[in-house]
Image (cartoon, rainbow, N blue to C red):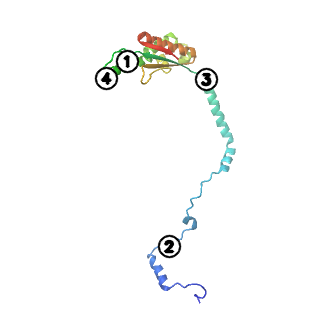
Amino acid sequence: DPARAGGMMPSPGASECNESLTPPGAVRMDLPAPFMEHRTDALPMIDFGAFGRALRRFWPVVILSAGLCVGAAAWYLRNTPALYLALGEIGVGQERSELLPSAAARGEDLKSLEMLKSIERQIAGQTVLLEIAKRFHLHHDPVLAGARAAGGLNDDEVIVALSKRVAANLERGTRNIVISVEDTEPQRARDICQSIIDLVVQRDPGAASALK
């Protein structure tokens, strides 16, 4: 007796109802349990053992690469001369001291800025650099000229080489122009910087200078 055994017999109506829920021609698929469950607590694992085995296998390549890098860095430092930096500063005085209307003052400020920019370009210009090259005999400098030190560089070449070591920059919001000179000798760097300042002051007596 099904009722006495504790079980229940499905009624014919229930089976017909379940069969009616499945459309004709539909395929029923039972997915495995791994596809039905989505675990969010699983974290990616790093196989340090595989990394260690690969390191033990290719350790000669690693040591050789490190040695080549260290050797190349040592060769570069040994064959590259050290550069010393000298800084100088030029302050250009204000020509007008009287009070002006605001519109006129703005016009004067623009003219002053153009004048400062012009002085900035002159400091690192061809005329000043060529004069410096002649004073310090840089046409035959072994660092600037390299293999052509014996024959010497022409004027254009020495100007290009020297322009990479001399720079002039106008400080924003001031009337000061900072001059920077790089050279392999610290004293010559200071002397070149001072010579540039002297040339600028001679051309513009209103400019005051300071060497750092």
**Camera-side mark, 3 or 1:** 1
Q: CA distance from mark 2 to mark 4?
A: 88 Å
Q: Which residue is mark 4?
A: 102
Q: CA distance from mark 3 to mark 1?
A: 42 Å
Q: Is residue 60 above or below residue 22?
A: above
- Does dot 4 land on a helix, a strand or a loop? helix
Q: Which residue is mark 1?
A: 115
Q: Position of residue 180 (x, y in %)?
A: 50, 20
The first of marks 3 and 1 along the sequence is 3
Residue 34 sits in quarter = bottom right
The first of marks 1 and 4 along the sequence is 4
- Does dot 2 land on a helix, a strand or a loop? loop
The first of marks 4 and 3 along the sequence is 3
Q: Which mark is residue 79?
A: 3
Q: Which residue is mark 2?
A: 28
Q: CA distance from mark 2 to mark 3?
A: 78 Å
Q: Amino acid at mark 1?
A: Met
